[in-house]
Image (cartoon, coloured by chain):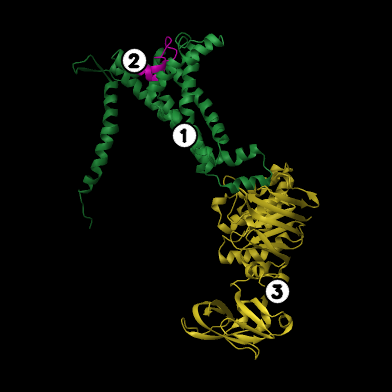
Chain colours: A green, B yellow
Amino acid sequence: MKVVNNRAWLFVLPVVILVAFNALIPMMTVVNYSVQETFGNNVFFWQGLDWFIQLMRSERFHAALGRQFMFTGLILLIEVPLGVIIALSMPRKGFWVPVCLVTMALPMLIPWNVVGAMWNIFTLPDIGLLGYFLNHTLGIDYDMTQDPFAAWVTIITMDVWHWTSLVVLLSYAGLVSIPDAYYQAAKIDGASNWSVFRYIQLPKMKRVLTIAVLLRFMDSFNIYTEPFVLTGGGPGNSTTLLSIDLVKIALGQFDLGPAAAMSLIYFAITLLVSWLFYTLMTKDDAK
Amino acid sequence: MSVELRGITKQVAGVTHIKPVSMVLEPGHFNVLLGQTGAGKTSLIKLMAGLDKIADGQILMDGQDVTKLSTQKRNISLVHQFFVNYPHMNVFENIASPLRVAGMAKSEIEGRVQEAADILQLGPMLKRRPHELSGGQQQRTALARAIAKESRAVFLDEPLANLDFKLREELREQLPELFAGRGAVVVYATSEPEEALLLGGKTALMNDGRVTQFGSTADIYRNPQDLTSAQVFSDPPINVAEVTKQGTTARLGTGVQWVLAGDAAGLADGNYTVAIRPNHVSPVKHDDRAVPVKGTVQITELSGSESSAHFTFGDDSWVSLAPGVHPYEIGQDHQFFMDPSKCYFFAPDGKLVA
């Protein structure tokens, strides 16, 4: 006969509470906001799916989403190959290994708002080191506070500077885990450097690169602090990414309902794209 | 095809790891490199393969100087002790990889891979990935890659060391056939003297980065040219003792003595080192000339049909290896008999004198 022991619930309780406060309750609060309208005083009016429908038709949302995809796409296209190239050219043993690793890790140790502020000052045309140099020494017309193109170049460069190291460190970890014997076998087979990369290094790096792409996707898709401090979304709306727009709606305009609906869609897109990346990149392993 | 080494050496940070090695390796038989771990077998193979730079000397393949030629261009194969196959390629692709790199026609690749796979009984496994294979199958894949490539020289670096006993015996029997008639120089590194004897051909004995003796396997087993060579080519280790020769009498420090005959009798009086293989020290007296040695038994081992006993007498520790089962008692004195005609005499500088 089975003995029913309800004490088991006590053991899962801490996890239930943790997950509830950490994820479920905040999430459901947002869901709750997303289907209602409020003007404060804790008074709510039922809206149904109105906010969602409104958002899906909103040109402002489409534009922000488009900018977000462009930003994430560009930084992935630059950071992943660049990170792999840097990792490949780093020494595998000797005195320079720790030097390279620490130098690589430095940008990632800097707080995000400091990174934004740093690049802001760095690129100011009148006093910034880079801004002044470009404008006054090289004679290139560069002002990221006025010119949307310059603003984009700056936020992309900043992100590449800040986060390529992550791809480098992960790829490097994958590279150093390859035993010498494989390189020797490839040499004996008569393989060229390209074949060694294509058939030995790349397959060995695949798993860590999957992680790197996923992390960089999620991080860059949800990025807020650095571009907010650097450009504040401007000039105009040219660098207003999704998260910046979201904060404007929620805290600037205090439209809690639409902001909540936007959060949920934002979250759904992040989740969907991450899942797609993961499924595509691990497809071969399943076989 | 031949591989000729002319005084090649290897240095790491100013320290000489391989002392000048000169020898000519030929096809048609196995060239065994025999030595303990750390003797320099793998280092020497890496030098021949071009994976490490030689500090001095020359390597010739077929009379052509390849010293400066990169590994990629030397047309060689190497099979490691641990199984090296490309993990993301199946068995077929693994065997085909050097041929594909060489840009060979597809039909020819298929023919060669099929042939190599048939010889090594890998036919049914061509579609599998290395991690789906047993250790023996993985190593056979590596061997098939070496065979399909039809390279000028094949280096086998303790290829059987990581396989279990049964597989090792099976593959060891097949190995000489696999490479017979292929015209490649086969170099086989091992740390087991028994393996060198089973494979035959020629053997180079290695110790401390030096080739101490090179020649036909059976010949150098019977005639070690110095004490180190005798020690390298003996398992269990060869028994060694200091001996004083006076007239026709040889005397060990412990009082064991016997009358010399043959070459040894003609040596000048003085101190020598005597060495005798464990299988010539027996607990049974086979003939009247056998010299009795009384020792205290320390360790005994029974390996099926043979029993060995490690015993001490005086400062010396010897091993006896004899067929049959013998009732040794640990810590007890036993009488052993050595065959004086099987003794090697080495001068104080280590050279064989009788």
The answer to whether dots 3 and 2 both sit on one chain is no
Dot 2 surroundings within 10 Å: few (below 14), some, or many (20 or more)?
some
Amino acid found under the numbered disc labelled 1: Val
- As displayed, is residue A209 above or below residue A60? below
Instruction: Indicate which disc residue B222 carries.
Output: 3
Q: Position of residue B247 (x, y in %)?
A: 69, 85
View extreme (bottom): residue: B288
Residue shown at 52% from the left, 44% from the top:
A177
Please tell me which of labels 2 and 1 falls first in the chain. Answer: 1
Task: Say which quadrant the N terminus of chain A sits in.
Answer: bottom left
Instruction: Indicate which disc residue A102 carries.
Output: 1
Q: Position of residue A272 (x, y in %)?
A: 42, 29
Dot 3 surroundings within 10 Å: few (below 14), some, or many (20 or more)?
few
Q: Nearer the viewer, residue A256 or B164?
A: B164
Residue B130 falls within the magenta-colored stretch: no
Q: CA distance from mark 3 to mark 2?
A: 92 Å
- As displayed, is residue B291 above or below residue A30? below
- Mark 1 belongs to chain: A
Q: Tag 1, which secondary structure?
A: helix
Q: Tag 2, which secondary structure?
A: helix
Q: Position of residue B155 (x, y in %)?
A: 68, 55
Amino acid found under the numbered disc labelled 3: Arg
